[in-house]
């Protein structure tokens, strides 16, 4: 009993320390996953904890379970709207990009380590996938929001590239162990089986699970458990059929997160927490599993392989995969740099142990060291690179009180609450009038703990609480009115988008007369929407910019493929020349 109590105490203290470490690392910009790995190593056999853990089978079981939960949550949090600009390039990166990265890294590893070329390619496959989810947690903790084209591409890639890396790893292990003579057919069949079965089971299972949850009549606290159990069942069915369980559970989560779902707010909150717990537990376990002294002999090899992976293989793969989609060079460089390695490579490095490959221990130590380098170098600089390449946009998501209303047979509605402060736009600007979206209804207005009888929207003061009911698509408009922006001055709407807001249907010739700007001859008669889409030569997203003589046009709002609103920034020299300030 004493041992049991000690284990419970130590486990809870380690978990608490890991959670508290997250608060500190957000302020310092340190990758949180690196902290968990280091805590795990301190708990291990060569650290103060002295825990000796070498059971690869249990590590693989727990790691696979944790990855499945993380991918399920990632799928539910991926909005289908981001597919407009991110799906095709992300799928290219998640398939062809992983193969190119694995091939280039593996070829160098085989040459440098002087091992069989198949073993080198196995190493390349193990480190082939990125962990962009870790990047986004770091970006969000620093208050950064990326342009949608970049953010959506990385977000979708992070959830869909793991199955390809797993498939390549299993295929190369089978080739090494089984000695197949026809490598091409073996790899092709493995690909069709893994990806095909994973996609079919994931889509069918996701639809079935959505149907089931919407028809269950159980206590609200059980809906999240039903969703998680259903997702893991889909993962298990796909894996038993020799398909990609990871792809299946990601697709199932994607369907659940983008379809009307009963008790969705409870399901989402629960899975956010359980995914964080799975991530913490997985990295702590992997830290305990490694023996730090065994990393020293492979340090030089791992440094060189990491350098080739980060500086050569990943950038080349990104350049080739994004070439057809005309990404601006700044965005290509950033996506190439954000190739952060995380848990998946370390979990995949356990597969050679299970298969009995002679070089398994060397591969595991090299992979672990590569992940450490990636977390240190890329993880610590990703925020700086986002600012350097000007890929930030003003944040559109805010932490406010928000509750989804499950009203059977009615349109989706949310109850949202705001606490007004001095920097809230409606308070700061002292507007005498403003227009609420048509779906919005004021529910309550409180001041000094008193519910006001008269809902006077023109008398809003700092310290007031305002509760409104609205359709989800109108929440961004409400945030612009009632949320105090904590973004730095460079990301304020006026500083970022410019002094004026123009409609996308405005004619350039009229703007030339109003603002005294020079319009190219070939652009006369075009609307702002047509001119910008033709000039950008890619899918427009918020934050795209085009420089004209004396002014800069900034895409402010997009609907589908159409540019709805455009910001107009006047240069200082243009303002001094006395340009007119309005139409």
Image: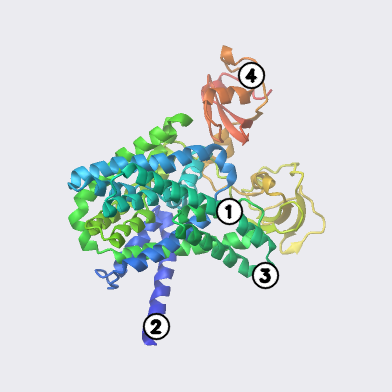
For residue 301, above or below residue 518: below
Q: Nearer the viewer, residue 455 or 217?
A: 217
Residue position marked by numbered label 1 in the rendering: 204
Pointer 3 or 1: first along the chain:
1
Residue position marked by numbered label 2 in the rendering: 4
Find numbered disc 3 in the image and state the secondary structure of the residue it sits on.
loop
Pointer 2 or 1: first along the chain:
2
Q: Picture coordinates of residue 38 (x, y %)?
A: 32, 62
Q: Which mark is residue 526?
A: 4
Using a 10 Å C-alpha cutoff, classify the residue at mark 2 as few (fewer than 14 neighbours), some (14 to 19) or many (20 or more). few
Alpha carbon separation for disc pair 2 and 3: 34 Å
Front position among marks 3 and 1:
1
Find numbered disc 2 in the image and state the secondary structure of the residue it sits on.
helix
Front position among marks 2 and 4:
2
Q: How many labels does the image show?
A: 4
Q: Picture coordinates of residue 548 (x, y %)?
A: 53, 21
Determine the residue positioned at 65% across, 68% down.
220
Pointer 4 or 1: first along the chain:
1
Q: Is residue 14 visible?
A: yes
| Quarter occupied by residue 387 | top left
């Amino acid at each position: 009993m004493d041992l049991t109590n000690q284990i419970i105490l130590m486990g809870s203290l380690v978990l608490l320390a890991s959670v508290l470490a997250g608060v500190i690392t957000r302020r310092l910009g340190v990758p949180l996953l690196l902290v968990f790995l280091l805590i795990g190593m301190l708990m291990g056999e060569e650290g103060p904890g002295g825990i000796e853990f070498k059971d690869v089978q249990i590590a693989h079981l727990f790691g696979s379970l944790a990855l499945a939960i993380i991918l399920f949550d990632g799928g539910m949090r991926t909005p289908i709207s981001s597919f407009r600009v991110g799906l095709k390039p992300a799928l290219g990166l998640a398939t062809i990009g992983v193969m190119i990265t694995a091939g280039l890294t593996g070829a160098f590893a085989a040459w440098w380590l002087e091992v069989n070329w198949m073993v080198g390619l196995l190493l390349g496959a193990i480190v082939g996938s990125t962990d962009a989810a870790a990047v986004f947690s770091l970006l969000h903790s620093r208050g950064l929001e990326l342009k949608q084209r970049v953010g959506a591409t990385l977000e979708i890639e992070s959830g869909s590239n793991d199955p390809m890396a797993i498939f390549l790893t299993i295929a190369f292990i089978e080739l090494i162990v089984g000695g197949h003579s026809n490598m091409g057919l073996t790899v092709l069949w493995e690909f069709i089986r893994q990806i095909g079965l994973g996609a079919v089971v994931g889509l069918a299972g996701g639809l079935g699970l959505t149907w089931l949850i919407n028809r269950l009549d159980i206590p609200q606290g059980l809906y999240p458990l039903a969703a998680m159990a259903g997702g893991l069942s889909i993962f298990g069915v796909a894996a038993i059929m020799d398909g990609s369980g990871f792809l299946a559970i990601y697709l199932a989560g994607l369907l659940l997160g983008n379809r009307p779902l009963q008790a969705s707010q409870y399901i989402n909150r629960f899975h956010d927490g359980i995914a964080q717990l799975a991530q913490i537990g997985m990295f702590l376990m992997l830290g305990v599993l490694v023996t730090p002294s065994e990393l020293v002999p492979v340090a030089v090899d791992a440094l060189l392989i990491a350098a080739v992976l980060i500086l050569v293989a990943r950038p080349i793969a990104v350049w080739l995969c994004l070439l057809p989609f005309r990404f601006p060079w700044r965005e290509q460089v950033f996506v190439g740099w954000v190739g952060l390695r995380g848990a998946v490579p370390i979990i995949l490095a356990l597969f050679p142990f299970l298969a009995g490959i002679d070089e398994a221990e060397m591969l595991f130590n090299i992979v672990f060291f590569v992940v450490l380098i990636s977390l240190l170098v890329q993880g610590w600089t990703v925020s700086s690179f986002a600012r350097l390449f000007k890929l930030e946009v003003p944040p559109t998501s805010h932490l406010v009180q928000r509750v989804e209303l499950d009203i059977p047979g009615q349109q989706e509605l949310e109850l949202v609450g705001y606490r007004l402060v001095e920097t809230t736009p409606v308070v700061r600007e002292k507007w005498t009038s403003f227009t609420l979206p048509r779906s919005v209804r004021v529910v309550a207005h409180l001041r000094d703990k008193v519910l006001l009888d008269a809902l006077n929207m023109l008398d809003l003061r700092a310290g007031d609480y305002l509760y409104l009911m609205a359709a989800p698509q109108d929440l961004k408009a409400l945030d612009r009115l009632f949320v105090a922006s904590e973004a730095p001055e460079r990301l304020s709407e006026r500083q970022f988008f410019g002094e004026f807001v123009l409609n996308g249907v405005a004619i350039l010739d009229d703007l030339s007369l109003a603002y005294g700007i020079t319009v190219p001859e070939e652009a006369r008669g075009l609307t702002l929407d047509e001119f910008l889409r033709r000039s950008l030569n890619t899918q427009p997203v918020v934050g795209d910019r085009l420089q004209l003589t004396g002014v800069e046009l900034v895409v402010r709002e997009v609907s589908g493929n159409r540019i709805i609103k455009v910001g107009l920034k006047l240069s200082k020299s243009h303002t001094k020349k006395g340009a007119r300030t309005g139409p």
